[in-house]
Image: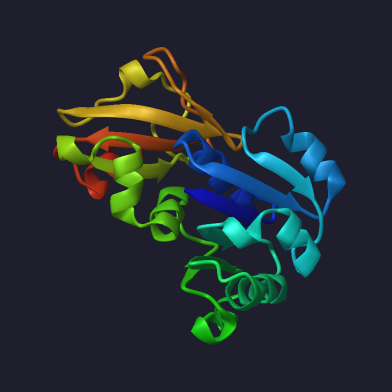
Amino acid sequence: MKALVTGAGRMGSQIARVLAAMGHDVTLVEIDDRRVAELAPVTVARLMVGDACEPAVLEEAGAHTTDLLIAATGDDEDNLVVGLLAKRQFAVPRVVARINDPDNTWLFSDAWGVDVPISAANPLMSLIEEATGATDTVALLRLSRAGVNVIETTIAATSRSAGRALADIALPAGTVVAAVIRGGRPVVPGESFVVEPGDEVLVVSERASGPDIHAAFQ
């Protein structure tokens, strides 16, 4: 799948990294050239400097051949403009747009070209699942045939797992930690990996539910 993400803040850059890690062809567009320079050493997505509200920028980023566009800037007005351009001018099949202010939720509809509105407060894996479709996400992770669940939990400063090695955290049977996203960068941890506040832990489990994983880490 070819994906285009606009806005390289925390949310946009993490979504781009995860999608790229899953094997998608990802382009990340950001107006701040300093932010792009910061991300260059730590992301495998194609980076591009530009204002995504400009049709010429979206065209250069490949909007005409994009399967999925995610408007993830910190400005609702910009996300709506990008969504409308993506759908009406470039006929992008699936447009996802970030909602920063809950009072603006009613605007994020097909009238503005938005297929899927996502809240900035949602956990990362929920955003990825809503953006690509949960079934597609699991297939890309090659887990669908195994009948397992992918669960995400974020470590808080008050979490009992903070400062502890994964080997010392009692997880439900049939559960493994697949990845930890720290500082926006995915890491494949070993048993000696020490969990820190702010880490986003992606867990694969045969039987455990979200509350089970939350209880283990929090």
Q: Is residue 150 visible?
A: yes
Q: Quadrant of residue 17?
A: top right
Q: Position of residue 81 (x, y in %)?
A: 69, 76
User: In the image, is 63 to the left or to the right of 34?
Assistant: left
Q: Quadrant of residue 69?
A: bottom right
Residue found 72% across the figure and 61% down from its top: 58
User: In the image, is 216 to the left or to the right of 87?
Assistant: left
Q: Quadrant of residue 204?
A: top left
Task: Give the answer, above or below, for where 107 lies relative to 50.
Answer: below
Foreground residue among 193 and 22: 22
Q: Position of residue 107 (x, y in %)?
A: 57, 85
Residue found 68% across the figure and 61% down from its top: 73
In the picture as drawn, the residue positioned furthest to the top comes out as: 192
Residue found 67% across the figure and 40% down from its top: 46
Q: Position of residue 18 (x, y in %)?
A: 50, 40
- Where the C terminus falls, by quadrant? top left
Foreground residue among 213 and 17: 17
User: In the image, is 159 to the left or to the right of 73?
Assistant: left
Q: Position of residue 70 (x, y in %)?
A: 57, 60
Q: Is residue 72 visible?
A: no
Task: Give the answer, above or below, for where 64 lies relative to 193.
Answer: below
Q: How many discs appear?
A: 0
Task: Give the answer, above or below, for where 37 lies relative to 87.
Answer: above
Residue found 47% across the figure and 48% down from its top: 1
How has the structure been colored for display?
rainbow
